Image (cartoon, grey):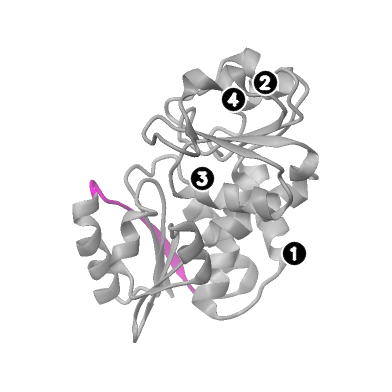
Amino acid sequence: MKLALIGKKLSHSYSQEIHEIFFELTGIEGSYRLLEVSGPEKLEDALLNLEESGFSGTNITIPYKIDVLSHAVYRSPEVIRLNAANTIAFTKSGRKAYNTDYFGFMRSVEKAGINPGAGGWLVLGSGGGASSVKAVLEDMGAPVIYTASTSKKGEGFLSYSELEGIKGISGVVNTTPVGMFPDTEGCILPEKAFKGLKYAVDLVYNPSRTKFLQYARDNGCVSVNGLYMLVAQAVKAQEIWNNKTFGDEIIDAIYSEMEKRI
């Protein structure tokens, strides 16, 4: 079984290691490679090349989770709801698009003991990852969700300059790449924004403690990086490609091994 990850910049990615550990633990024979694609106009060629080379599927990451939708003949119910895909299966009937980010984020929230219903939430970013995060928070009882974006305006979106006036927020999730390796000094919010919050989640996993999470810990927040989500969504993708259920034990085992390595 040959698999891949398509994204624009992948030097930060742990996906190859995660899937290699998965293959070791399950005894499945497989490989996983990283494929950088410079722009959305190159996406079709990249997908076609993988198909013609006998790959079973590929993951999709920033910034192509929305762009890839037009390259698939089938969209799962999660993809239709979220308008984003992070997993493609190559089948005889064509490319099938799935979203395992939803599952990954939900498992991460549950693992950390976070209660989305404790108050309002602020989601930073408006890409494919943000749609999965908002759906999970909504389904787990968040009473109100605000979205901050630099690229989208209008109903449902706030500019970052409007955030100071928001009240009743219990948690914040960063779905942007700000603070990700190699630009680790960045933080999308000032430290004062974390005062009074209960929860802070950063989907960035490299480095394991971003400036965002450091500010959160310094202000007493339950803070979670994106590693457990990454592992959980990877296992869910493997379930799709292998048409088999693997369960939480595999997720926990891979996560533990990744923590040791990091």
Comparing labels 1 and 2, the label whose residue is closer to the camera? 2
Q: Mark 1 is on which residue type?
A: Glu
82 or 215, which lies in front? 82
Q: Secondary structure at mark 3?
A: helix
**Residue 57 pos. (x, y %):** 40, 70
What residue did someone put label 2 on?
194
Residue at position x 54%, y 61% in the image: 100
For the question of whether residue 120 can be seen, the reply is yes
The reply to whether the C-beta atoms of the residues labelled 3 and 1 are less than 8 Å apart is: no
Comparing labels 2 and 4, the label whose residue is closer to the camera? 2
**Residue 210 pos. (x, y %):** 58, 27
Residue 165 picture quarter:
top right
First to last magenta residue range? 29-39
Residue at position x 63%, y 72% in the image: 26
What residue did someone put label 4 on?
212
Residue at position x 76%, y 51% in the image: 110
| Side of 138 relative to 203 (left or right) | right
Sequence-wise, the earlier of marks 3 and 1 is 3
The reply to whether the C-beta atoms of the residues labelled 4 and 3 are less than 8 Å apart is: no
Say if the magenta span includes residue 90. no
What residue did someone put label 3 on?
130
